Image (cartoon, rainbow, N blue to C red):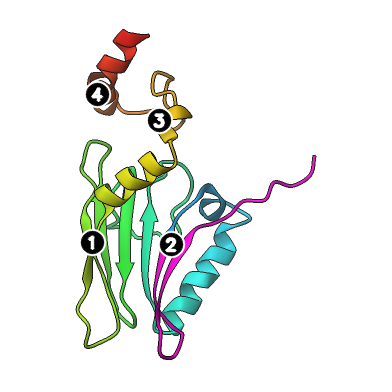
Amino acid sequence: MPPIEVRITTVEIRDTASNTLVTSIEILSPVNKREPGITPYRQKRQRLYRANVHLIEIDLLRRGTRPFVHPRLPSVPYLVTLTRAQAQEIEVWSIALSDLLPVIPVPLRSPDADVPLDLASALRDIYHEAFYNLSIDYREPPLKPALSEEEQAWVDALLMPLRTKA
């Protein structure tokens, strides 16, 4: 079987005067959360850090290995991180299945202030523009890893109207 080409989405914010990369927004995919893709992705993260680029990573996948590991990292299904250029700490937004997606800061080049990115609004717009409602059957059981009892109860309550229409 021939290999399948996968497009990995990255949003870049550049200084238009010098075409210098200021902020990279990475939307993690299964490719960069498992081998052989996770190693090159980790190398890319290091290159961005060394190049003084702000890095936002949006991980809305429950499966796979996160690109970085830390003992104090919360055990949640979803995670958004912001590594500011030359910062010694990473800003983390831990997101449970039932949580609303946060509004996060997008750093620009000094002296410009951060701009807010409303992840819930952005995801809602993408969902509607891509017509995901036509290709996703929410009545099907969720993919692995299995949901906790509490998460499953939340999903069941949320999907009750869909299941009664079937």
N-term-proximal mark, 3 vs 4: 3
Question: Which residue matches tag 2?
Answer: 26
Residue closer to the observer: 122 or 146: 122
Looking at the image, residue 112 lies above or below residue 123: below
Looking at the image, residue 158 lies above or below residue 23: above
N-term-proximal mark, 1 vs 3: 1
> In what element is the residue under mark 2?
strand
The alpha-carbon separation of the residues under discs 2 and 4 comes to: 29 Å
**Residue 8 at what x, y percent from top left?**
54, 56
Q: Is residue 20 visible?
A: yes
Residue flagged by tag 2: what amino acid is it? Glu
Q: Say which of marks 3 and 4 sits in front.
A: 3
- Residues drawn in magenta: 1-25
Question: Which residue matches tag 4?
Answer: 158
N-term-proximal mark, 2 vs 1: 2
Dividing the picture into quarters, in which one does residue 107 lie?
bottom left
